[in-house]
Image: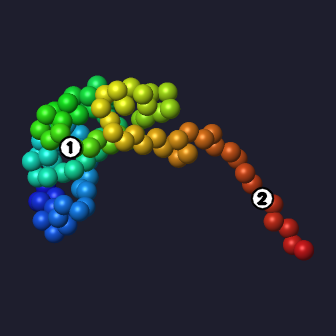
Amino acid sequence: MPALRNAKEKLGHAQKLQVEVSNEKEARTAIDLGADILIFESLSAEEVGKLTKLGRSLSPSLGFECSGQITVANARTYAEAGASVIRINLLQSSPAAMDISFVVQPF
Protein backbone atom coordinates (compact mmCIF):
# COMPACT_ATOMS: atom_id res chain seq x y z
CA MET A 1 0.00 0.00 0.00
CA PRO A 2 2.62 2.57 -0.95
CA ALA A 3 -0.16 4.72 -2.39
CA LEU A 4 -1.69 5.17 1.06
CA ARG A 5 1.59 6.34 2.58
CA ASN A 6 2.13 8.71 -0.35
CA ALA A 7 -1.40 10.13 -0.09
CA LYS A 8 -1.07 10.60 3.67
CA GLU A 9 2.19 12.52 3.21
CA LYS A 10 0.75 14.79 0.50
CA LEU A 11 -2.67 15.42 2.04
CA GLY A 12 -1.68 15.68 5.68
CA HIS A 13 -4.06 15.41 8.60
CA ALA A 14 -6.87 17.52 7.11
CA GLN A 15 -8.09 14.73 4.81
CA LYS A 16 -9.49 11.38 5.90
CA LEU A 17 -8.16 8.35 4.04
CA GLN A 18 -10.39 5.32 3.56
CA VAL A 19 -9.03 1.89 2.72
CA GLU A 20 -11.06 -1.16 1.76
CA VAL A 21 -9.85 -4.27 3.56
CA SER A 22 -11.08 -7.85 3.62
CA ASN A 23 -8.95 -9.56 6.26
CA GLU A 24 -6.81 -9.00 9.36
CA LYS A 25 -3.53 -8.69 7.47
CA GLU A 26 -4.89 -5.95 5.20
CA ALA A 27 -6.45 -4.17 8.18
CA ARG A 28 -3.18 -4.18 10.14
CA THR A 29 -1.26 -2.88 7.13
CA ALA A 30 -3.77 -0.10 6.45
CA ILE A 31 -3.74 0.99 10.10
CA ASP A 32 0.07 0.92 10.24
CA LEU A 33 0.20 3.15 7.16
CA GLY A 34 -2.21 5.69 8.63
CA ALA A 35 -5.70 4.85 7.32
CA ASP A 36 -8.43 6.85 9.06
CA ILE A 37 -11.35 4.66 8.01
CA LEU A 38 -11.50 0.97 7.13
CA ILE A 39 -14.14 -0.07 4.61
CA PHE A 40 -15.56 -3.59 4.79
CA GLU A 41 -17.29 -4.72 1.58
CA SER A 42 -19.49 -7.83 1.71
CA LEU A 43 -18.09 -9.20 4.98
CA SER A 44 -20.25 -11.00 7.51
CA ALA A 45 -21.20 -9.19 10.71
CA GLU A 46 -18.99 -11.64 12.61
CA GLU A 47 -15.97 -10.74 10.45
CA VAL A 48 -16.75 -7.03 10.87
CA GLY A 49 -16.90 -7.51 14.64
CA LYS A 50 -13.46 -9.14 14.72
CA LEU A 51 -11.88 -6.48 12.51
CA THR A 52 -13.43 -3.52 14.36
CA LYS A 53 -12.24 -4.93 17.68
CA LEU A 54 -8.73 -5.29 16.28
CA GLY A 55 -8.86 -1.83 14.70
CA ARG A 56 -9.98 -0.11 17.89
CA SER A 57 -7.23 -1.81 19.87
CA LEU A 58 -4.63 -0.50 17.40
CA SER A 59 -6.13 2.93 16.71
CA PRO A 60 -9.02 4.13 18.95
CA SER A 61 -9.97 6.97 16.58
CA LEU A 62 -10.35 4.67 13.55
CA GLY A 63 -13.68 4.68 11.72
CA PHE A 64 -15.39 1.66 10.14
CA GLU A 65 -17.70 1.60 7.12
CA CYS A 66 -19.68 -1.44 5.98
CA SER A 67 -21.44 -2.05 2.68
CA GLY A 68 -22.61 -4.88 0.47
CA GLN A 69 -25.04 -7.59 1.59
CA ILE A 70 -26.49 -5.17 4.15
CA THR A 71 -30.24 -4.75 4.28
CA VAL A 72 -32.64 -2.85 6.48
CA ALA A 73 -33.28 -6.16 8.25
CA ASN A 74 -29.65 -6.84 9.22
CA ALA A 75 -28.26 -3.29 9.58
CA ARG A 76 -28.57 -3.38 13.39
CA THR A 77 -26.36 -6.48 13.50
CA TYR A 78 -23.60 -4.61 11.67
CA ALA A 79 -24.00 -1.58 13.93
CA GLU A 80 -23.68 -3.81 16.98
CA ALA A 81 -20.59 -5.39 15.41
CA GLY A 82 -18.90 -1.99 15.49
CA ALA A 83 -19.62 -0.24 12.19
CA SER A 84 -19.65 3.54 12.48
CA VAL A 85 -21.10 3.99 8.96
CA ILE A 86 -23.43 1.53 7.22
CA ARG A 87 -24.21 1.86 3.53
CA ILE A 88 -27.36 0.17 2.27
CA ASN A 89 -27.74 0.09 -1.51
CA LEU A 90 -31.49 -0.30 -1.28
CA LEU A 91 -32.31 1.67 -4.42
CA GLN A 92 -29.77 -0.20 -6.52
CA SER A 93 -30.34 -3.75 -5.36
CA SER A 94 -33.90 -4.10 -4.10
CA PRO A 95 -36.44 -2.80 -6.61
CA ALA A 96 -38.19 -5.38 -8.70
CA ALA A 97 -37.56 -5.09 -12.42
CA MET A 98 -40.34 -3.74 -14.59
CA ASP A 99 -40.89 -4.53 -18.23
CA ILE A 100 -41.49 -1.21 -19.97
CA SER A 101 -41.87 -0.84 -23.69
CA PHE A 102 -42.74 1.99 -26.05
CA VAL A 103 -44.42 1.94 -29.41
CA VAL A 104 -43.26 4.75 -31.67
CA GLN A 105 -45.69 5.82 -34.39
CA PRO A 106 -45.33 8.53 -37.02
CA PHE A 107 -47.43 11.69 -36.60
- Which mark is on residue 103? none
Q: Mark 2 is on which residue type?
A: Phe
Classify mark 2: residues with Cα within 10 Å, few (<14), some (14-19) or many (20+): few
- Which mark is on residue 102? 2
Residue at far right of view: 107
Image location of residue 35, percent across then percent down: 18, 51
Reading the image, the residue beneath label 1 is 61
> Is 57 in front, or is 22?
57
Residue located 12% across and 60% down the image: 5
Residue located 81% across and 65% down the image: 104
- Image position of 75 with respect to 41: above or below: above
Left or right: 78, with 30 as reference point? right
Image location of residue 99, percent across then percent down: 70, 47
The C terminus - image quarter: bottom right
How far apart in space, not on screen, are marks 2 and 1 (Cα)?
Answer: 54 Å
Q: Is residue 42 visible?
A: yes
Q: Mark 1 is on which residue type?
A: Ser
Image location of residue 75, percent across then percent down: 43, 31
- Image position of 8 with respect to 96: above or below: below
